[in-house]
Amino acid sequence: MDLLIKNGTIVTATETYEADVAVDGGKIAAIGTEFNEKDFTEVADAKGKYVLPGAIDGHTHLALAFGGTISSDDYYAGTRSAACGGTTTVFDFVQQGQGERMLDAVKRRDAMASVDAAVDYSFHIGVGDVNTKEMLDSMEEAVEYGIPSFKVFMVYDFGVDDGSFYKVLQKSTEIGALVGVHAENRDVNNLLVERYLSEGKTEAWWHYMAKNEMVEGEADVRAINLAKMAGAPLYIVHLADEMGMKAVTEAQNEGYPIFAETCPQYLHFTNEVYKRERGRDFVCSPPMKNQASQDAIWDGIQNGSITTVATDHCPFTQAEKDWGITKKDGTPGDFTTIPNGCAGVENMYPYMLAQAVSGRITMNKAVELCATNPSKLFGLDYCKGAIRVGLDADLVIYDPEKAFTITNDAMHGDTDHTIWEGVQLKGYPEATYSRGNLVFKDGEFLGKRGDGKLIKCKKLSFTGPEL
């Protein structure tokens, strides 16, 4: 056989036990304690280490055209960075164009990803045009192809109105799909932007103020109510506010299939970052919120109301972030001209696992949030998200004693800064395997461009908040 990982402590979402993992043909072939090392081409000793399933980042934006530029990590840089943080599968977003069938949008984007991705990937489809029956019905083609997840935006000029959102939710129940939502109140956001700019308020702080707790929270509540009306499941992405967290918990307690994702930046930073000298580096949407919101989200993780942790990885260079001061044409800028997004795909699993090492959550909870739940929610549990015979050998050897300080120099993406600069972690991935291939070891990326493949997802069906 190809690989034996011996002497490690296996951690899944539900179990922790000592055993060896045998890998053959890219799959987990056996789990046990009585293997003969001579039967294996490669042997890795994980004594004193944890053996974990590779993380699944359910929310990335690679090579995304946004804010007058393109996010600085393409599919190679982004998946390379993912591998070096123990993430072995990423979900990127395909934005449907006007008059473009959903499946055509997927194939268009996959042509970019397939030649560059270093680990496996899949897609969510950003809904752009459901104005005709043909465009709405094209959702089903995508589901049959293996892309059963869609996203609507309640904000931005390409966002949908509530009627279109409701139509997409209704359609999802007919075809075995899940609808995710970026929930912010577009009209109020636009009015606040206009007000602050008219008052000469241009700094990064006012980005937060124009997308404050209630601007997000109202939209969270409205999205949940639309899902209830449509009798459809709903996935709220990058949840960052207390009002939304309470609404999610209440809906789940009532038995509705409402799921929520949050991101490490909301668990670690608050809106105080926008007062920093380079507060513009932290500009993302939704922005980091107040301490009460952060506390509510941590409570949601503890009580199970938060289903997944993902990153919303969408980095831009500092020069591009500086457009908030001077636009690229040399004219004065403001908070609306700062490209929205931060890097995070390499930091998610290490950060959440460090919270487990510190005792804030369990190791099992970290695996559940970052690997097992995403695999179940998006229809990949037939091949990923756990350590089980027959699944892909997406595995991470994790050293709980290794001290690691995050610096941009130690990261493996293509951007020139990280909002995580100087954050200290206890515990860090030592090695990452993607389908049995060693892609990261002791700080060095060992994978190859193009080795990642599109993973198709199965149809989805949720009758309640339990996965």
Image (cartoon, rainbow, N blue to C red):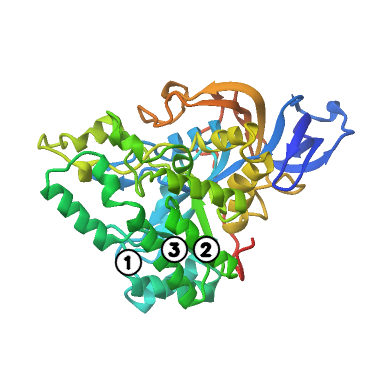
Contact flag, marks 2 and 1 (Cβ < 8 Å): no
Marks 3, 2: nearer the viewer? 2
Badge 3 is on which residue? 103
Q: Could you tell me which secondary element the residue under label 1 belongs to?
A: loop
Give the percent coordinates (x, y) of residue 348: 52, 38
The extreme right residue here reads: 34
Disc nearer the start of the sequence (3/2):
3
Q: Amino acid at mark 3?
A: Leu
**Residue at position x 31%, y 44% from top?**
340
Q: Amino acid at mark 2?
A: Pro
Q: CA distance from mark 2 to mark 1?
A: 19 Å
Residue 424 visible = yes
Q: Residue at x 68, y 43 (%)?
A: 364
| Residue 402, quarter of picture | top right
Please, what is the three-letter code of the amino acid marked with disc 1?
Answer: Val
Pointer 2: residues within 10 angstroms few (<14), some, or many (20+)? many
Neighbours of disc 3 within 10 Å: few (<14), some (14-19), many (20+): many
Number of marks in the image?
A: 3
